[in-house]
Amino acid sequence: MDEQAAPDGSPTHAHQYDATALPLGMRVLAGGINTYLRAIALSSHHVVENVAPIHKLQLDEKPLIILLWHERTFQVPSITSFCPRPLHALTSRSRDGAIIGNVMRKFGMLNIQGSGTGAAANKQTNPRKRGAQAYRAMLQVLRRGESVIATADVPPGPAREAGPGMIHLAARSRAPIVPLGISRAHQIRMRNSWDQLRVPLPFGKLAMVFADPITIKRDLSESRLAEIQTEISARITGAQVQAESLTGEVSD
């Protein structure tokens, strides 16, 4: 899931990935990931902290923008039962994004395509236009009262630094941002990836920690935007640290 939105005036166009639309090899890979993540979810003990504010917003029928770090992408399907529905996941148009979007769909999430990061994708469509399409699609989703989950940091990095796109979206839609930390007791860290992506391992504890929601005012100066980016980064990291303390996280 990549936060790839840009607020300009391009036409709206949201996509749901369909397994039959992927090449055979990608369908097989997505199916394998789906089976593996389901097995992990069933073998884990779940702990959820500070979910009461989320439930209150749901009772008030308010949409949410849930933000987490990109490194935790593979842990998102396990938490869908604790999040508002319908829930739309933002993914890129790259090959990896297509596979991830397919897996998210199998877990009951809807999918919005953002801009891809690969060279092949960039040759086909202007990435700024694709980002604008995703932004407008998410804005429509939020205005319908439905929620969005995305990563706050974007490839190629830097990791664990919130970008401006989702903040602009929150300001325009008036949907609160909910920072989220996710941790598993055991996982593999992909040390060569830009975000050191964590791949979960079976068994053990899964912890989710929601930070308090943040509502962004519509009129944002450049200095205020920078302050909010820093604040959101700190809140996601704080939630992440708390989640890791609950699981005693170990990375191989």
Image (tube, rainbow, N blue to C red):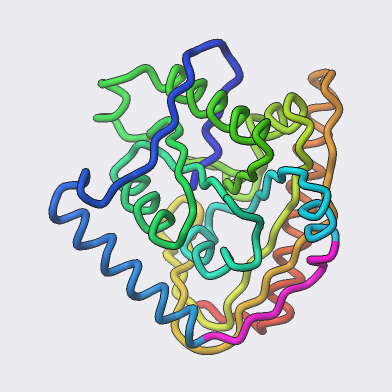
Q: Residue 33's spot in the image, x, y percent? A: 32, 67
Q: Is residue 156 above or below residue 124?
A: below
View extreme (top): residue: 9
Along the line of sight, which residue is nearer the eye, 236 or 99? 99
Q: Residue 146's spot in the image, x, y percent? A: 64, 42
Tell me which segment is drawn in magenta.
44-52
Q: Is residue 1 above or below residue 243?
A: above
What residue is at 38 percent from the left and 41 percent from the top? Answer: 16
Q: Is residue 203 visible?
A: yes
Lateral position of residue 69 relative to residue 191, left or right? right
Q: Is residue 99 above or below residue 141?
A: below
Quarter of image, res 52: bottom right
What residue is at 57 percent from the left and 50 percent from the top? Answer: 87
View extreme (left): residue: 24
Q: How many marks?
A: 0
Q: Is residue 124 above or below residue 238?
A: above
Q: Residue 213's spot in the image, x, y percent? A: 82, 49
